Amino acid sequence: MSLSLADILAARRAIDGIAARTPLVPSPFLSRLAGLDFLLKLETTQPVGAFKLRGAVNAVSALAADVAGVTCCSTGNHGRGVAYAARARKLRSVICMSSLVPQAKVDGIKALGADVRIVGRSQDDALPESRRLARDEGLAEISPFDDPYVVAGQGTIGLELLEDRPDLAAILVPLSGGGLAAGIALAAKAIKPSIKVIGITMDRGAAMFESVRAGKPVEVDEVASLADSLGGGIGLDNRLSFQMCRDLLDDYVLVTEEEIYAAMQTLYFEDRMVAEGASVVGIAALKAGKLPSFSGPVATIVTGRNVDMATFTDIITGRDVKLGDSFVKGRAYGA
């Protein structure tokens, strides 16, 4: 299985009019901190509040006319994108998720008319139910990251980034199952081979990072995280995103829950934006001094806004946040 720039260009045509072309805006505060132009790609402005709509629409648009419906396993935003795309085609959708998915994301998917199945405590637990639905009920299963149409759809972000700023030196990409990072890296490096693409993820339960380090897909323990969208495994039978991330990403950076907490505060207070923890890992890496030096402008993907607002309010007001059996200690912004 392989993809090329032509597949990403085809995906752009397929999603046009459903998924938005999103703004790329500078952050004056983060630019001063970085000492160069630091830009934010606002996938928060998608109709479902997250970049996942791109890949979902491209995958659903490629299905046969007589398909019975669609199913997927999701940590939240992919399910929302699939439900939205399925509703546009008047298809049944069944979204399988674990109990770690925040209720706000579950409710958002139900509001789009999808049937939600909560199975187990990890994405790996929920995956067998999605596969059973595909096998027993004839639904088309759409992987959140290991599907060529999904990867190509996410790669349209790379096209837009370099059309808007051809001088970009690097792209910081939140890294989970690798569909976003793989698609962006493929598009960006096909257009500008010298560009650096860096995958950024949390320091616990980082499945793609651990898999690349091991040289093969491996299982990890999924844990509660402020960056819940980055949770889940990549599948031991991963056919596409593992190889692409291994071959195309230039580096990996891990950030802590405390650094994610601080970055969510920063984006809110300095740029007046509400975003999920997964969206700010690039900002977290910058603030923590974990990025290499770059010779020109840098962009990061603000991937989604579908955050649990009670948790977000706790973070903005500097309160402690409970994550499973542990806490992220709160502090007021700027303290």
Image (cartoon, rainbow, N blue to C red):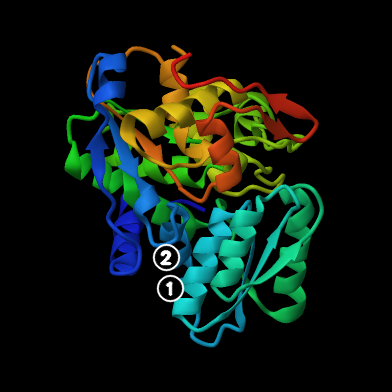
Vertical placement of 42 versus 119: above or below?
Answer: above
Left or right relative to 194: residue 331: right
Q: Image quarter for residue 301?
A: top left
Vertical placement of 24 versus 109: above or below?
Answer: above
**Residue 203 position within the rendered picture, expressed as x and y whole percent measured from the top left:** 63, 24
Name the residue rendered at 36%, 57% in the picture.
Answer: 7
State the separation of the CA atoms marked 1 and 2: 5 Å
Left or right relative to 20: residue 245: right
Give yes or no for contact between labels 1 and 2 (Cβ–Cβ under 8 Å). yes
Vertical placement of 175 versus 146: above or below?
Answer: above
The residue lying toward the viewer, choosing from 321 and 169, is: 321
**Residue 91 position within the rendered picture, expressed as x and y whole percent measured from the top left:** 54, 81
What residue is shown with label 1? 61
The residue lying toward the viewer, choosing from 113 and 194, is: 113
Name the secondary structure under disc 1. helix
Name the residue rendered at 61%, 23% in the picture.
Answer: 330
For label 2, the crowd category at 10 Å Cα-Cα, with few meaning under 14, some 14 to 19 and many 20 or more, is many
The three-letter amino acid code for the residue at tag 1 is: Ser
**Residue 117 position within the rendered picture, expressed as x and y whole percent measured from the top left:** 74, 66
The three-letter amino acid code for the residue at tag 2 is: Asn
The residue most toward the bottom is 66
Report if residue 200 is visible in the image. Answer: yes
Name the residue rendered at 35%, 53% in the picture.
Answer: 45
What residue is shown with label 2? 58
Name the residue rendered at 25%, 47% in the picture.
Answer: 23
Name the secondary structure under disc 2. helix
**Residue 2 position within the rendered picture, expressed as x and y whole percent measured from the top left:** 46, 51
The residue lying toward the viewer, choosing from 192 and 104, is: 104
